[in-house]
Image (cartoon, rainbow, N blue to C red):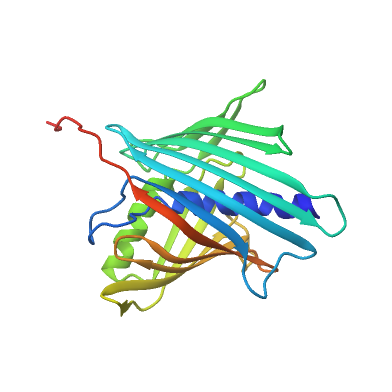
Amino acid sequence: MGRFVSGRIAVAVLVAGLLAALAPSRPAGAGLVPHRAFYRLEPLAGRTPPATRVEGRLALEWRRTCGGWASRQRLAFLMAPDDAAPFVVDIRFRGFERLDGRRFDFAMETFEDGRPVERTEGRAWLPGTTRERGGLVLKGPEPRRLALPATTRFPARQMEELLAAARAGRALVDQLVYDGSGEEGLVRAVTLFGRPRDRSGRRLWPFVMGYHRPGDPAPLPRLQLWGEMDEGGVFRKLVLDFGDFALRAVPVRIRELPLPPCPARP
């Protein structure tokens, strides 16, 4: 059961890490902001993993280049099931999304107790019109090619749209997203925004985001993220909810990174 739980945490943290591309401190309307952040993962009170102890750390970096967004993530956590020996999982992700949102390069490696157990690397792209289909190539000894619907969003574009929707007062956003986690990385992300409120001079939106398999008739999502985000996109509260247990991401340190000195576009 410990390996099953660890896989679910890995997918959730990848999703949450991509969501963390939102601005740590910028005025409303500024959009995504380059930054580096460190979080502590801990069980939510009363919602601990079944028969398992979890302790973890998460490091994220979103860096703007003249051509797009470069992202890096590293997650390391200890799993200690009651019925098995404890083990350490180390997950490393890097990606690059072009500014126009039409190409996404990614690689993810997973280690258990220091031994490599899985590697995913590939490129996803979208066409110039909605009449065509995008594609995905996963590298390896036997490369795999998969189609992507033209309406697919990659992570940075997904978050730009969510920020714009919250500011425009939209309560529901339904998106098809590819997150870079391999063959099953295409998900339907449904986000509900609650009524905003002001606290200490800051506007906050409560939100719940459910991740579903495309075409799955099941009403419950595979994963839910919930919490609050502000006008700059900071997640003031963030919980990864698996249904039978939940983890809280506690910010430890967040630092804004400089924008590159890019030449003006003609």
- Give the farthest residue toward the front: 252
Residue 151 in view (yes/no): no
66 vs 166, nearest the viewer: 66
Residue 185 x, y percent position in the rendering: 57, 45
Q: Does residue 161 sit above or below 48 in this rendering?
A: above
Q: Position of residue 203 (x, y in %)?
A: 30, 73
Residue 160 against residue 218 in the figure, above or below: above
Residue located farthest toward the left when viewing the structure as drawn:
266
| Nearer to me, 3 or 156 | 3
Outermost residue, right direction?
83
**Quadrant containing the N terminus in the rendered view:** bottom right
Q: Is residue 128 above or below residue 55?
A: above
Q: Is residue 120 visible?
A: yes
Look at 29% across and 65% down and name the residue there: 231
Seen in the image, is 147 located left or right of residue 24? right
List x then y, in percent, for residue 37: 43, 50
Q: Relative to residue 208, is residue 200 drawn left or right? A: left
Q: Is residue 76 above or below residue 55?
A: above
Q: Residue at x 37, y 43 (%)?
A: 130
Number of residue marks: 0
Residue at image coords 22%, 60%: 27
**What percent of the width, then of the height, locates residue 11?**
61, 50
Q: Quadrant of the C terminus?
A: top left
Q: Residue at x 39, y 50 (%)?
A: 21
Q: Is residue 213 left or right of residue 115?
A: left
